[in-house]
Image: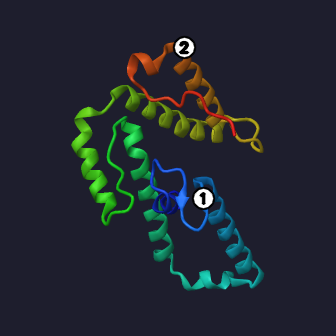
């Protein structure tokens, strides 16, 4: 939701908001996060947790399911290695984006899909196996770290960006 608020004020590609004062994307995200934290502190101070008793389980589950659908929708193009148009400010954006994904299905980068499915399988498998066989129950098994390091080494030495046309981050600027 923060990304949607940021793109509604500063569309992708623009770096400054020409309003009362010049704003950068990080300023908008920081202000929104700070305001959300202040609202949560005020709700905690006034002990407003009783309001959650008036929300039925169906409402809470509906919001959680909607958040999961939005998250899956935003990750699906990257998982398949395809490009789809950004439809963040349209009505029925999820349906339109799923249609766009289906239209681009012929252009799926199968190597990206293989890397994605292997990573997901490793993460789910390590969670299942670490619950049974990891001897240190108080210390979580570092499956995410192991995956990150191994895929970085795999990417570097096999040159998957050049050979397989897999998008990588490259250099991350400091500051």
The picture places residue 132, in percent across and down from the top left corner, at: 64, 39
Residue on which disc 1 sits = 23
Residue on which disc 2 sits = 157
- Mark 2 or mark 1: whose residue is earlier in sequence: 1
Q: Residue at x 57, y 54 (%)?
A: 25
Q: Residue at x 39, y 45 (%)?
A: 76
Q: Nearer the viewer, residue 141 or 69?
A: 69
For label 1, the crowd category at 10 Å Cα-Cα, with few meaning under 14, some 14 to 19 and many 20 or more, is some
The picture places residue 162, in percent across and down from the top left corner, at: 43, 17
- Would you place residue 57 above or below residue 156 in this image? below
Give the secondary structure at mark 2: helix
Q: Is there CB contact under 8 Å for labels 2 and 1? A: no
Q: Nearer the viewer, mark 2 or mark 1?
A: 1
Q: How many marks?
A: 2
- Would you place residue 5 above or below residue 73 in this image? below
- Would you place residue 53 above or below residue 33 in this image? below
Q: Is residue 158 left or right of residue 35?
A: left
Give the secondary structure at mark 1: strand
For label 2, the crowd category at 10 Å Cα-Cα, with few meaning under 14, some 14 to 19 and many 20 or more, is few
The picture places residue 30, in percent across and down from the top left corner, at: 66, 59
The picture places residue 73, in percent across and down from the top left corner, at: 39, 52
Residue 149 - label: none
């Amino acid at each position: 939701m923060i990304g949607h608020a940021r793109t509604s004020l500063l569309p992708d590609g623009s770096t400054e908001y020409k309003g009362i004062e010049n704003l950068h994307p990080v300023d908008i995200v920081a202000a929104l996060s700070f305001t959300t934290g202040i609202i949560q502190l005020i709700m905690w101070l006034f002990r407003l947790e009783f309001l959650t008793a008036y929300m039925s389980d169906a409402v809470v589950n509906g919001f959680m399911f909607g958040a999961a659908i939005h998250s899956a929708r935003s990750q699906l193009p990257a998982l398949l290695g395809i490009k789809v148009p950004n439809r963040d400010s349209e009505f029925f954006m999820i349906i339109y984006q799923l249609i766009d994904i289906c239209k681009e299905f012929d252009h799926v980068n199968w190597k990206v899909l293989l890397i994605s499915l292997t990573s997901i399988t490793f993460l789910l498998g390590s969670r299942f196996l670490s619950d049974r066989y990891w001897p240190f129950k108080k210390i979580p098994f570092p499956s995410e770290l192991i995956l990150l390091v191994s895929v970085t080494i795999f990417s570097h030495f096999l040159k998957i960006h050049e050979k397989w046309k897999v998008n990588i981050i490259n250099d991350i600027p400091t500051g």
